[in-house]
């Protein structure tokens, strides 16, 4: 029986244990990075999490959903959705610094580097998996950043003609050359001070470019 063909018998509205959901997500992140998407079965994830396969399916409909949720969970650890909500009394510089620091830490973490290498390696043979990863992680962050920049426009803090392009510019600047060197194994994670100086420089540059 394939992973997708297994159907949960749990009734609708049945309360789910948050601790078990978290354990499943953590197990999924570990196994997807170690064994790849195709090499990580729902049986193996259930065993790693210490739960039954039925419990995995009661929390996550199928492996595609679990993979997407694992990617979202990793992103939310460093970049909570509230980071992208700009209050009227908050300076855009402060919001961008928080996002920049979170994103820089996220993309240069050992887990993210391993996941990116996995996605790149399997992209040709498994395009749907790569699309799932992009939709659950990078694309969601781009949409959230675009939303933040639209808020900054409305509040008169920035003047961004194309928020979608500007969002891509910001994240690309944060990545810089360091992230590429990390991906190909030519660099260790930047030190705390070096990383923060880089983020601050990017934020100053970005705000200068789009300040009204």
Image (spheres, rainbow, N blue to C red):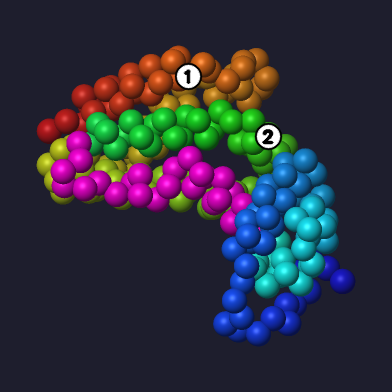
Start-end of magenta stretch: 66-91
Q: Secondary structure at mark 1?
A: helix
- Please report the residue visible at 72 percent of the width from the left and 44 percent of the height from the top: 30
Task: Identify the mark at residue 59; answer none if there is no mark.
Answer: none
Q: Circle 2: is it few (<14), some (14-19), or many (20+) Cα within 10 Å?
A: some
Task: Identify the mark at residue 192; answer none if there is no mark.
Answer: 1
Looking at the image, residue 65 sits to the left or right of residue 161; the answer is right
Q: Quadrant of the C terminus?
A: top left
User: Do the numbered discs 2 and 1 sit on residues whose CB atoms are within 8 Å?
Assistant: no
Q: Nearer the viewer, residue 113 or 54?
A: 54
Residue 107: x %, y % from top left: 54, 33
- Please report the residue visible at 38 percent of the width from the left and 23 percent of the height from the top: 199
Rounded to the nearest angstrom, the CA distance separating label 2 from label 1 is 21 Å
Magenta region includes residue 134: no
The quarter of the displayed image where residue 5 is located:
bottom right
Looking at the image, residue 162 sits to the left or right of residue 172; the answer is left
Q: Secondary structure at mark 2?
A: helix
From this view, report whether residue 54 is shown above or below residue 107: below
Q: Earlier in the sequence, mark 2 or mark 1?
A: 2
- Please report the residue visible at 20 percent of the width from the left and 40 percent of the height from the top: 90
From this view, report whether residue 198 is shown above or below residue 172: above
From this view, report whether residue 210 is shown above or below residue 56: above
């Amino acid at each position: 029986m394939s992973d997708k063909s297994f159907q949960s018998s749990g009734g609708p509205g049945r309360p789910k244990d948050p601790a078990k959901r978290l354990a499943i997500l953590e197990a999924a992140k570990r196994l997807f990075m170690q064994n790849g998407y195709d090499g990580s079965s729902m049986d193996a994830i259930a065993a790693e999490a210490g739960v039954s396969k039925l419990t995995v399916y009661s929390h996550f409909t199928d492996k595609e959903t679990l993979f997407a949720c694992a990617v979202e969970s990793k992103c939310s650890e460093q970049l909570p959705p509230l980071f992208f909500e700009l209050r009227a009394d908050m300076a855009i510089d402060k919001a961008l610094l928080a996002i920049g620091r979170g994103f820089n830490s996220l993309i240069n973490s050992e887990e993210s580097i391993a996941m990116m290498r996995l996605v790149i390696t399997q992209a040709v043979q498994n395009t749907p998996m790569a699309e799932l990863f992009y939709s659950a992680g990078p694309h969601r962050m781009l949409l959230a950043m675009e939303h933040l920049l639209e808020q900054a426009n409305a509040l008169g803090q920035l003047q961004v003609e194309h928020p979608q392009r500007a969002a891509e510019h910001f994240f690309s600047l944060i990545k810089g050359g360091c992230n590429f060197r990390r991906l190909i194994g030519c660099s260790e994670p930047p030190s705390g001070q070096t990383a923060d100086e880089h983020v601050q420089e990017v934020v100053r540059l970005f705000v200068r470019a789009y300040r009204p």
